[in-house]
Amino acid sequence: MASAISAHAAKDDWKQQFEKVSDEYFDQVYFHYAPTNGTLVGYHQYDAQLEDYSRKNIDAEIAALKVFGKDIEAIQPAVAAADFVPRSDREIVLANIRSELLTLEIIRPWEKNADNYSSTCANAAFTLMERKFASPDERLRSLVARERQMPVLLADARVNLKNPPRIFTEIAIEQLPDIVSFFEHDVPLAFAEAKDPALKAEFAQTNAAVVASLTSYLDWLKTDLLPQSNGDFRIGAEAFSKKLEYDEMVDLPLDKLLEIGWADLRKNQAHFNQVAKELEPNKDPQAVLEELGEIHPAPDQLLNAFRGTFDGLISFIRSRHIVTIPSDVRPIVEETPPFMRATTTASMDTPGPFETHATEAYFNVTLPDPSMTPAQVEGYMHSFNIGTVISTAVHEAYPGHYIQFLWLPQAPSRVRKLLGANTDVEGWAHYTEQMMLDEGYGQPGAGAKDERESKFLRLGQLQDALLRNARFVVGIEMHTGKMSFDEAVAFFQKEGYQSKESAVVETKRGAGDPTYLYYTLGKLEIMKLREDMKKKQGAAFSLEKFHDDFLRQGFPPVKIVREALLGDDSPTL
């Protein structure tokens, strides 16, 4: 445990003190209580450990967080410009500690969210499967160690869960059959190459015990917990504001944020309606949206459709000097792993910043389920229309998340490689969707074959933007008690231009991810920063240099990137 630090000593040698205490924080708290994250970032000393959600351990984590919070608060940073990175890193670590305390003490998912427990088991196994950073036997040995602890974790869930929100219990019940199937089929298949007979026999036992525990947990959720699930998923205005302040360093009042969110929603709706009228003057925008949905690849060509975007995107980025691409290695496009298919249509899975062996990046795409009827397949494929395929490829790969990953080695500190803000991570990826089209991608001869296709690409980008706009409003309104779950579903349909099926999924996500406004919020912060840089630099402004300088910072809140690039602490919005 970090020792108390005198203010006098901190002033004398504050950078070294901060580096020492922040390293201790990562090692003794951050990864100690979340070892699966350790595996993810490439710290394989955590591979055999599993999260411990016993009440005793939760209380120990809260106590440790408070000690480290006080120790870091006691470090008095200098204000010299040369000290900006460690000074801002101190703010990032403090904010992370405060966010963790808010989560554990106020939001309390360990007491409300049954899916946290079963999904933790699945994630703990998946992180040892997805990358071959060690031999199959070595990784299987770690998995066996983790699996031995999973029945205990699920037993702790039965003690901890008290009057949870019904929607959370329903989501857990919905997810669990896939998780059980994952352990029954996918996990054994992933370690089929393991050679040690004794180890394989041990794994057969631990894996069977996990399957039995998960099956029993599902039965318990249905028969015992669901009838007692009458709690409220809303976190309330105060916790919402604090979460935004700690996670994103945004402290605007919620009513002001709502004004900003509504204004951008209306702007994007007007733009969508205008482009739809240009395409089909005699149809209403919803009919044009339906027409757009019908223009999609065949399901068995979907992966190739995404691979086929890379050449054009990379060529455009380089020829137009959009951003430096630090590597010619491309992400591997593959079908989404089975246990993730219920919750994602596409994702970028990059190795952790300290992973040295298995450094492949995977662009996961969820194909239609084989059990779907032809009509259901067609409806599902509407979400992969000609416009959203491009928008998704930009968001996930070029120049979105994959380019962020390629720049991460240049982040200025360990803190910046490990801690990030969603307004930066998702804000950047969402910003690039619009920026690429604004810069000319998707025009005839540059990503589109004719003017009509170009307009459809813009509609796809705007449909994705409206989805994020709806999240912005729904997150605030639902969690402050001004919008019911059913009203949120209707809002996604009417204002966000989403299907009923998509609207239900999005509202479920918002129940457990209250601040998922960070896509639009981060995009707007980046756009304001770009405009302010243009004003400051005038004719000397370079879009490529702006983007490179932005990515070089790692993933901190945009407020910190703004101070690094502009040299002031002016408002981010």
Image (tube, rainbow, N blue to C red):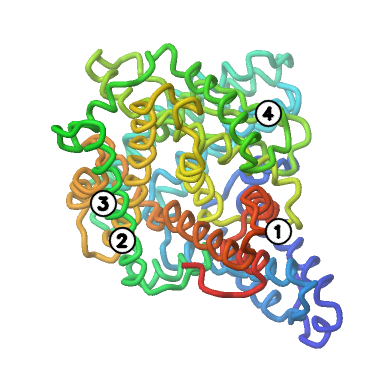
Q: Where does residue 435 sit, x and y in percent of width and height?
A: 49, 45
Distance between mark 3 and mark 4 Cα atoms: 42 Å
Amino acid found under the numbered disc labelled 2: Ala
**SS for tag 2?**
helix
Distance between mark 2 and mark 3 Cα atoms: 37 Å
Residue at the image point whose x is 65% and y is 53% from the top: 542
| Residue pointed to by mark 3 | 229
Front: mark 2 or 3: 2
Label of residue 403 in the image:
none
Label of residue 360 in the image:
4
Q: Residues within 10 Å of mark 3 (few under 14, many from 20)?
A: many
Q: Where does residue 486 sit, x and y in percent of width and height?
A: 18, 49
Q: Is residue 78 above or below residue 273?
A: below
Decide which of 234, 161 is in the foreground and name it: 234
Residue 44 visible, this angle: yes
Label of residue 415 in the image:
1
**SS for tag 4?**
loop
Left or right: 254 in relation to 330? left
Distance between mark 2 and mark 1 Cα atoms: 35 Å
Q: Quadrant of residue 44?
A: top right
| Residue pointed to by mark 2 | 263
| Residue, far bottom | 8
Distance between mark 2 and mark 4 Cα atoms: 40 Å
Q: Are the residues flagged by discs 3 and 4 in contact, CB closer than 8 Å?
A: no
Residue at the image point whose x is 43% and y is 21% from the top: 449
Front: mark 2 or 1: 2
Q: Residues within 10 Å of mark 1 (few under 14, many from 20)?
A: many
Q: Residues within 10 Å of mark 4 (few under 14, many from 20)?
A: some
